[in-house]
C-alpha cells in the first residue's frame, strides 16, 4: 500500500482521530505520526488517523494479554458472551446508516453495498451468539471404566491478532472478531491502513455493549510494522489474516518461530462456468448473463470471490459475451454516495494502476477487448481525481495469459471457452487458488456432477456470491488455510482440551521398588 494513501502528514486539514485503542483507552500513536484517509471517489483526504507502529502494537498486545490472563471476558459464561454479541448486533442495526456511509467513503463502494455489509455483519454476530448459547459445554467420552469421567471441551486460544484487508473492512474484521469473542478470547485487530474507519467504529460499539476493557484492542497502521509485529509477537497465540497471497506467506513465516495458530484467507481466481443448456430459454440466458455481470463487477471486482473468469460453452460464447459487454458498458460508475450509482471507483490509485497494467499485458498477449479497458470521462458523479475504471470484458483468453492466472482485483472479466464437460472442469480447476466457483446448467445432474469435481471452498450452482454465516468460508490450494464462519469458523479460535477424571485412584505399580 506504500505510496497510495500512505502519506504521513505534518499539516492536517482534518482533526486527527485517536484511533488506537488499548486497555480501554483511545489515543494517538506513541510516535505522534498520522495518516490521511483518502476518499477514492475524488482522491481527497476526509479523515486523519493515528499511524501506529511496533511500540503501539506491543502496548496493545500487553493489554490483550493482561485481559486474557486476569480479566473477566475469558471467564464469562457462554450465555453472557452470547448476550454481549447480541447487544453488539443491535448497536450495528442502530448505526446501519452511519456505518454504511462510512464504509462507502472509506472504500469507494456504494452506500447500498455498505448497508448490505452491515446487515451481513449483524447476521454474523447473531449467528455466533446462537452457536455458543446452544452448545453443550463438553463431550463426555467413554474411557472404558465406570471409575473415570472423561470430558473433551473447548477453551479460548488466548490473545488473537486479527489482520484485515481494504475491500470489506467491517465485514472481514467481524468474521474474525465475532467468533474470537464468542470463544472467549481477547484480541488486537489491525485493519488495512487505507480503510480503518469502520473497524475503529466497531471497537467503539464493543465497548458500548459492555465488553470489558482490554478484551478488544485496535492498532491502526501499516502491515510491514504493525502487522508484522503482531504476526511474530511471542504473546500472541493466534494470528488470523485476510489479504493477498504474498502478505499471507510473510505472516505465516513470521508466525512460525513462536508456533502460534495461523489462519489465512487469501485470494482467488474464481471460475464462473456456463453451460449452453443454462441459456436455452430467454429467461435462463438473461439470468446467467445478469449474474455473470454481478459476479465480476460488484464492488468494481474488488472481491476475493469475484467471478473474474467466465468459462463459457463455445456454442453460446458469442451471444453471451456480446450481451455481457453491452450491459457492462451501461453500468453507472460514480461516487458511491450518489443516488443511482451502481459501481464506485477502485480503492486507490495504486490499485487502478495494477488493473491497467494487467489489462495492457493481456491485450499485448492477444486478448480481445469487448468492453471498457479505459478510465471513464470525468463527470458530475465522477470527479477527475477519483480512481475510476470502466468494467472491462476481455475475450479470447487462455491459460498462458497472466491475466487468467493472477488475481487482478478489479473490474476485469476474462472469457475462456470449452466444448465438453471434462474440459470445463479442467479449466475451472486450472488455478493455484481454490476459493470459489460457480456452475450454470439446466441439467441438474450435470450441475451436481461438475460441482462435485470443482476444487474450490465454495461452489454455487445457478447462482453467484451468496454466502451464509452458518456455512464455512475459505479456500483450497493457495486461497488459504482454515475456515471462517460456520462451526469451523468458531473452532479456529479454540483449543481442544481433554479432562480425564479418575474417580477411584489407586497405585499402578508399574515400578515395583
Ligand atoms: P494485503 O495483503 O496487501 O493486506 C492485507 C492486510 O495485511 C492489511 O491490513 C495489510 O496492512 C496487512 N499486511 C501487509 N503486509 C503485511 C505483513 N508483512 N505482515 C502482516 N500484515 C501485513 O491485501 P489487500 O490488498 O489489503 O487486500 C486484497 C487481498 O485480500 C486480495 O488478494 C483478496 O483476494 C484478499 N481477500 C481475501 C478474502 C478471503 O476471504 N479469502 C477476503 C477479502 C480479501
Image: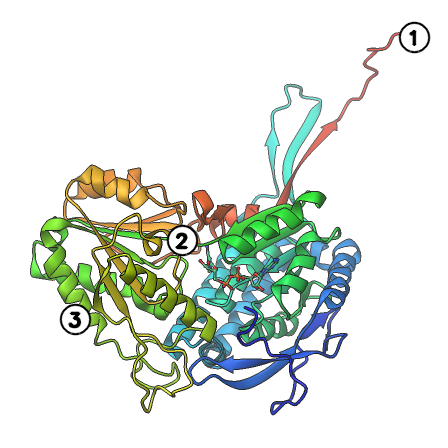
Q: Residues within 10 Å of mark 1 (few under 14, many from 20)?
A: few
* x and y, in percent, of residue 413 in the image: 28, 61
Task: Looking at the picture, tell me which residue is in the foreground, 13 or 460.
Answer: 13
For mark 2, what is the residue? 268
Numbered tag placed on residue 322 in the rendering? none
Classify 227 as above or below 299. Answer: above
Task: Looking at the picture, tell me which residue is in the foreground, 363 or 489.
Answer: 363
Tell us which disc is closer to us: 2 or 1: 2
Please report contact status of discs 3 and 1: CB closer than 8 Å, yes or no.
Answer: no
For mark 1, what is the residue? 513
Q: Seen in the image, is 404 located left or right of residue 127? A: left
Q: Seen in the image, is 475 located left or right of residue 209? A: left
* x and y, in percent, of residue 462 in the image: 23, 53
Distance from Cα at disc 3 to Cα at disc 1: 89 Å
Task: Looking at the picture, tell me which residue is in the foreground, 31 or 17.
Answer: 31
Task: Please say which color scheme the image uses.
Answer: rainbow
Q: Earlier in the sequence, mark 2 or mark 1?
A: 2
SS state under label 3: helix
Q: Seen in the image, is 300 located left or right of residue 222? A: left
Please identify the quadrant where the C terminus is shown: top right
Q: Can residue 216 be seen in this view?
A: yes
For mark 3, what is the residue? 326
Q: Residue furthest top?
A: 512
Query: Based on the displayed image, in which of its 4 quarters is residue 112 positioned?
Result: bottom left
Amino acid at each position: 500500500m506504500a505510496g497510495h494513501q500512505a502519506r504521513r502528514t505534518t499539516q492536517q486539514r482534518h482533526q486527527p482521530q485517536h484511533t488506537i485503542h488499548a486497555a480501554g483507552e483511545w489515543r494517538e500513536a506513541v510516535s505522534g505520526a498520522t495518516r490521511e484517509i483518502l476518499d477514492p471517489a475524488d482522491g481527497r483526504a476526509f479523515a486523519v488517523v493515528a499511524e501506529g507502529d511496533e511500540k503501539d502494537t506491543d502496548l496493545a498486545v500487553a493489554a490483550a494479554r493482561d485481559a486474557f490472563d486476569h480479566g473477566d471476558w475469558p471467564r464469562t459464561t457462554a450465555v453472557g458472551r452470547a448476550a454481549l454479541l447480541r447487544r453488539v448486533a443491535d448497536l450495528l442495526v442502530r448505526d446501519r446508516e452511519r456505518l454504511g456511509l462510512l464504509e462507502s467513503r472509506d472504500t469507494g463502494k456504494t452506500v447500498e453495498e455498505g448497508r448490505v455489509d452491515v446487515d451481513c455483519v449483524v447476521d454474523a454476530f447473531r449467528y455466533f451468539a446462537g452457536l455458543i448459547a446452544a452448545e453443550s459445554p463438553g463431550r463426555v467420552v467413554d474411557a472404558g471404566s465406570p471409575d473415570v469421567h472423561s470430558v473433551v471441551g473447548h477453551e479460548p486460544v488466548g490473545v488473537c491478532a486479527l489482520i484485515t484487508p481494504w475491500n470489506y473492512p467491517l465485514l472481514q474484521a467481524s468474521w474474525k472478531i465475532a467468533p474470537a469473542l464468542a470463544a472467549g478470547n481477547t484480541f488486537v485487530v489491525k485493519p488495512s491502513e487505507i480503510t480503518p474507519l469502520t473497524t475503529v467504529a466497531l471497537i467503539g460499539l464493543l465497548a458500548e455493549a459492555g465488553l470489558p476493557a482490554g478484551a478488544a484492542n485496535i492498532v491502526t497502521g501499516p502491515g510491514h510494522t504493525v502487522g508484522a509485529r503482531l504476526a511474530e509477537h511471542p504473546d500472541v497465540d493466534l494470528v488470523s489474516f485476510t489479504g493477498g497471497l504474498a502478505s499471507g506467506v510473510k505472516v505465516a513465516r513470521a508466525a512460525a518461530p513462536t508456533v502460534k495458530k495461523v489462519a489465512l484467507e487469501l485470494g482467488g481466481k474464481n471460475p464462473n462456468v456456463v453451460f449452453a443448456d443454462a441459456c436455452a430459454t430467454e429467461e435462463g440466458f438473461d439470468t446467467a448473463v445478469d449474474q455473470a455481470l454481478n459476479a465480476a463487477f460488484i464492488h468494481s471486482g474488488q472481491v476475493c470471490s469475484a467471478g473474474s473468469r467466465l468459462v463459457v460453452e463455445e456454442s453460446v460464447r458469442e451471444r453471451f459475451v456480446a450481451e455481457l459487454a453491452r450491459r457492462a458498458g451501461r453500468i453507472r460508475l460514480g461516487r458511491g454516495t450518489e443516488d443511482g450509482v451502481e459501481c464506485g471507483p477502485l480503492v486507490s490509485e495504486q490499485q487502478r494502476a495494477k488493473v491497467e497494467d494487467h489489462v495492457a499485458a493481456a491485450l499485448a498477449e492477444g486478448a480481445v477487448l469487448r468492453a471498457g479497458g479505459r478510465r471513464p470521462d470525468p463527470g458530475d458523479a465522477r470527479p477527475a481525481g477519483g480512481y475510476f475504471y470502466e468494467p472491462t470484458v476481455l475475450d479470447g483468453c487462455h491459460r498462458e495469459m497472466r491475466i487468467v492466472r493472477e488475481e487482478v482485483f478489479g473490474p476485469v472479466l476474462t472469457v475462456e471457452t470449452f466444448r465438453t464437460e471434462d474440459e470445463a472442469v479442467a479449466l475451472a480447476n486450472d488455478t493455484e487458488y481454490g476459493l470459489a466457483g460457480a456452475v450454470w446448467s439446466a441439467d441438474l445432474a450435470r450441475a451436481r456432477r461438475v460441482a462435485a469435481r470443482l476444487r474450490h471452498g465454495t461452489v454455487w450452482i445457478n447462482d453467484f456470491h451468496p454466502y451464509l454465516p452458518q456455512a464455512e468460508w475459505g479456500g483450497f490450494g493457495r486461497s488459504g488455510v482454515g475456515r471462517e464462519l460456520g462451526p469451523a469458523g468458531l473452532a479456529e479460535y479454540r483449543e481442544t482440551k481433554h479432562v480425564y477424571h479418575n474417580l477411584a485412584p489407586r497405585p499402578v505399580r508399574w515400578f515395583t521398588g
